[in-house]
Amino acid sequence: MSEYEAIQQQIAELQRKAASIRAVERAAALANIKSLMATFDITAHELSGKAPAGNVGTAVSSAKKRSNGSKVPPKYRDATGNVWSGRGLKPRWLRDAVASGATVESFLIG
């Protein structure tokens, strides 16, 4: 057996030992975490930083309600009836018109 092969076998054995030790230490860490969570009444949601699904009325859920893609009246319109609210990316019809020399303001609705 060459020196290289011997070292590769040592590496493989050390990796197996490391995996075994990691599994034991991980199990102990999980037991410690579970014990602390029970002692201090900590939930998994608190650890993840996410609000539980049932928390209606919190600042996070009300912010989500506002950003649910609510409809707003159109702000721009062209002669063929295409409209755009002014939010998000400019629609193709408006980009093409601006590229042809028109101004965005010329499409403002009253």
Image (spheres, rainbow, N blue to C red):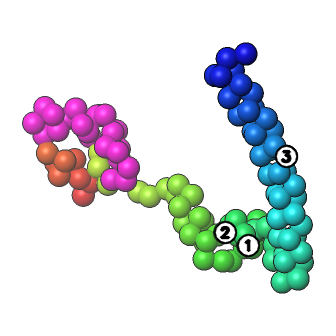
Q: Is residue 85 left or right of residue 14?
A: left
Instruction: Kindly report which numbered mark, 3 or 2, lies closer to the viewer in this rendering.
Output: 3
Q: Which residue is mark 1?
A: 46
Give the residue furthest to the top.
Answer: 1
Q: Earlier in the sequence, mark 1 or mark 3?
A: 3
Q: Is residue 29 left or right of residue 82?
A: right
Give the residue furthest to the left.
Answer: 101
Amino acid on which disc 2 is placed: Gly
Q: Is residue 47 visible?
A: yes
Q: Is residue 79 visible?
A: no
User: Mark 1–mark 2 contact, CB under 8 Å?
Assistant: yes
What residue sits 75% from the left and 40% below the top? 14
Tell me the crowding category of disc 1: few under 14, some 14 to 19, or many 20 or more residues within 10 angstroms, Cα based.
Answer: few
Q: Residue 101's image quarter?
A: top left
Per the rendered image, the range of residues in magenta is 78-102
In this rendering, the answer to whether 103 lies above or below 100 is: below
| Quadrant of image for the N terminus | top right
Mark 1–mark 3 Cα distance, whole angstroms, equals 30 Å
Q: Which residue is mark 2?
A: 49
Q: Residue 11's image quarter?
A: top right
Mark 1–mark 2 Cα distance, whole angstroms, equals 5 Å
Tell me the crowding category of disc 3: few under 14, some 14 to 19, or many 20 or more residues within 10 angstroms, Cα based.
Answer: few
Instruction: Kindly report which numbered mark, 1 or 3, lies closer to the viewer in this rendering.
Output: 3
Amino acid on which disc 1 is placed: Glu
What residue sits 65% from the left and 22% below the top? 3
Amino acid on which disc 3 is placed: Ser
Point out residue 77 in the picture as x, y percentages from the top left corner: 29, 45
**Helix, strand or loop for the magenta stretch, by majority:** loop
Residue 20's disc is: 3
Point out residue 45 in the picture as x, y percentages from the top left corner: 75, 68
Q: Residue 27's image quarter?
A: bottom right
| Quadrant of image for the C terminus | bottom left
